[in-house]
Image: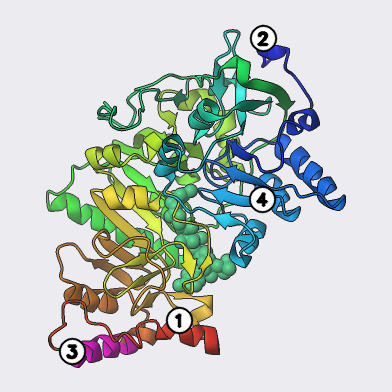
């Protein structure tokens, strides 16, 4: 069956090369895509070839690239390989691009994912020249059936001067009905409350809209999303998952949470996925999820009937998880809603619904500050992603990590984090394979004792205690958050100097 049934837009069908020719050096290009789902499959590669040829002729050709979140090697990887990017926002996890960001070649704007759309509307990033957006179909009236992610697509389609649509036949046509695109967002002072009080509530339209006059090309493709296999939970991620699930039980018993818990958000990675596996075997029923990314663990919970409703902006499935979804698309309809990332991650909604946020971290310090994004202070790993959107506004947040990195040469619990994404004022519970530290309602000094006792690896525990003891003794008049300033980042400096903390 034809996927492009709109007579007007049907006349714009073009090759990827013809479409890419609409993108000029220096343009800002907004593309679809979020955690490997829903990125355009053909135009970015054609553009990368064009940029490579221009560079071979000695011509300057670089663009600014705005997305939802991470894309795939055929987008970020291909454009990085030809040195075709000068700016990138708001999130990427591509290793080739990471090297260029860290070398200073590409400017990276590591924005909260819920902020990127509104900051584009505010004009903080300048004009958007072209949008390249993947969809599952174009209806006769020109409405667009979104694909496996919504991300920032609505904003890019609305804001861009020119639009290129990729219609991917690989996407199930049955995706129609999985989306809820909110068209009520305005710019201050014209904002009104977002009337959403349940994760599965519809507040928008199942379709994306586009002004047909702006559409310069429609490219037909047939190619899969990027699906990375998930690491099977190891002993350590299972241990962290067990601690977390037990803690939720404790919260229910204490009357701080209903028996069906509160809506769950889980970041990407094997530990958040292991937590979902833990919930599968736990007694909780009637769970809900208000999250960004649908990983396999959430599908498992849906299949087991434990999870009743699931709101997200994108899929992030393993190849097996994706196949399971494709084989049973119909059975998930009505239980999953994909929204724009400004809504899936919206602080107002996260706060109202009382989300339980579970995210990975790189390191935490003894006082509870968390670094999710930087290695040794200066080099970006991926970015803050949606972790700040959820953690800051959550009813209850968890940050999880192994207590050691790089085979034990690094302690993930340090005297002072080398970069702060989530401050001590935001962070509730830290979990490593060593244990869980509930930091709610504690003073910084009490937090330090608890983090060291429960989360630090035994190889580093005594040194951390010694640091805090000496800091307390050094300045009796400054014991609220005791630090030794000349030593606070000494562990990181030692790693850079000697290869171990
Ligand atoms: O690097 O691959 O070079 O060895 O960091 O570490 O242990 O594989 O952990 O895959 O769960 O990722 C925080 C990065 C954790 C992720 C982070 C090094 C380690 C390895 C990865 P190598 P692991 P994970 C929803 C929410 C921010 C965005 C977010 C992330 C690499 O969770 O990107 O939360 N979060 N989004 O060796 C130096 C340490 C280290 C360290 C680990 N203490 N010091 N290096 N590493 N600990 C999703 C979205 O928003 C889209």
> Percent position (x, y) of residue 381?
53, 63
Q: Is residue 409 magenta?
A: no
Q: Secondary structure at mark 2?
A: helix
Looking at the image, tell me whether mark 3 or mark 2 is earlier in sequence order. 2
Q: CA distance from mark 2 to mark 1?
A: 59 Å
Q: CA distance from mark 3 to mark 2?
A: 74 Å
Q: Are marks 1 and 4 in contact (CB under 8 Å)?
A: no
User: Badge 4 is on which residue?
Assistant: 85
In the image, the residue with mark 1 has its CB under 8 Å from the nearest atom of ligand 1: no
User: Badge 2 is on which residue?
Assistant: 8
Total marks placed: 4
Near mark 1 (Cα within 10 A), the count class, few <14, some 14-19 or many ≥20, is many
Q: CA distance from mark 1 to mark 3?
A: 23 Å
Q: In the displayed image of the protein, which residue is found farthest to the right?
A: 57
Above/below status of 495 relative to 172:
below
**Which mark lies nearer to you, 1 or 3?**
3
Near mark 2 (Cα within 10 A), the count class, few <14, some 14-19 or many ≥20, is some
| Magenta residue span | 462-474
- Residue found 64% across the figure and 61% down from its top: 105
Which of the two residues, 120 or 413, is positioned nearer the viewer here? 120
- Name the dominant secondary structure of the magenta segment: helix
Looking at the image, tell me whether mark 2 or mark 1 is earlier in sequence order. 2
- Left of 2 or right of it: where is 416? left
- Residue found 74% across the figure and 47% down from its top: 61
User: Badge 1 is on which residue?
Assistant: 492
- Residue found 18% across the figure and 92% down from its top: 473
Looking at the image, tell me whether mark 1 or mark 4 is earlier in sequence order. 4
Above/below status of 247 relative to 32:
below
The quarter of the picture where the N terminus appears is top right
Q: CA distance from mark 2 to mark 4?
A: 33 Å
């Amino acid at each position: 069956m034809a996927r492009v049934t709109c007579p007007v837009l049907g006349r714009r069908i073009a090759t990827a090369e013809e479409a890419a020719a609409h993108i000029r050096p220096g343009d800002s290009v907004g593309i679809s895509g979020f955690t490997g789902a829903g990125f355009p499959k053909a135009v970015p590669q054609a553009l990368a070839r064009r940029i490579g040829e221009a560079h071979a002729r000695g011509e300057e050709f670089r663009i600014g690239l705005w997305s939802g979140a991470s894309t795939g090697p055929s987008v970020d990887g291909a454009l990085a390989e030809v040195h075709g990017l000068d700016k990138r926002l708001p999130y990427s996890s591509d290793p080739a691009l990471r090297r260029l960001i860290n070398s200073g070649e590409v400017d990276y704007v590591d924005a909260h994912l819920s902020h990127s759309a509104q900051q584009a509307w505010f004009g903080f990033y300048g004009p958007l020249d072209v949008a390249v957006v993947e969809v599952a179909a174009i209806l006769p009236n020109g409405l667009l059936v979104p694909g496996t992610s919504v991300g920032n697509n609505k904003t890019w389609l609305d804001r861009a001067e020119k639009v290129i649509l990729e219609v991917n036949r690989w996407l199930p046509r049955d995706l129609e009905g999985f989306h809820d695109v909110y068209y009520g967002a305005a710019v201050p002072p014209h904002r009104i409350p977002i009337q959403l009080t349940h994760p599965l509530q519809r507040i928008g339209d199942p379709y994306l809209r586009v002004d047909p006059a702006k559409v310069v090309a429609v490219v037909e493709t047939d190619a899969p999303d990027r699906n990375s296999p998930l690491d099977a939970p190891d002993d350590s991620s299972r241990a962290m998952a067990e601690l977390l699930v037990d803690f939720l039980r404790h919260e229910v018993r204490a009357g701080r949470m209903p028996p069906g818990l509160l809506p769950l958000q889980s970041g990407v990675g094997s530990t958040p996925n292991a937590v979902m596996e833990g919930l599968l075997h736990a007694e909780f029923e009637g769970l809900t999820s208000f999250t960004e990314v649908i990983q396999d663990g959430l599908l498992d919970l849906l299949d087991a009937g434990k999870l009743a409703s699931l709101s997200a902006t994108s899929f992030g499935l393993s190849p097996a998880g994706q196949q399971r979804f494709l084989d049973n698309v119909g059975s998930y309809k009505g239980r999953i809603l994909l929204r724009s990332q400004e809504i899936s991650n919206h602080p107002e909604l996260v706060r109202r619904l009382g989300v339980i946020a579970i995210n990975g971290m790189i390191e935490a310090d003894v006082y509870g500050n968390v670094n999710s994004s930087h290695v040794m202070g200066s080099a970006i790993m991926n970015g803050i992603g949606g972790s700040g959107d959820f953690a800051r506004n959550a009813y209850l947040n968890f940050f999880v990590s192994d207590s050691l990195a790089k085979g034990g040469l690094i302690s993930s619990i340090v005297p002072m984090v080398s970069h702060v994404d989530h401050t001590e004022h935001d962070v509730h519970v830290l979990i490593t394979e060593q244990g869980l530290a509930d930091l709610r309602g504690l003073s910084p000094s009490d937090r330090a004792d608890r983090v060291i006792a429960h989360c630090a690896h035994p190889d580093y525990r005594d040194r951390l205690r010694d640091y805090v003891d000496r800091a307390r003794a050094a300045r009796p008049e400054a014991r609220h958050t005791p630090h030794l300033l000349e030593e606070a980042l000494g562990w990181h400096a030692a790693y850079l100097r000697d290869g171990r903390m």
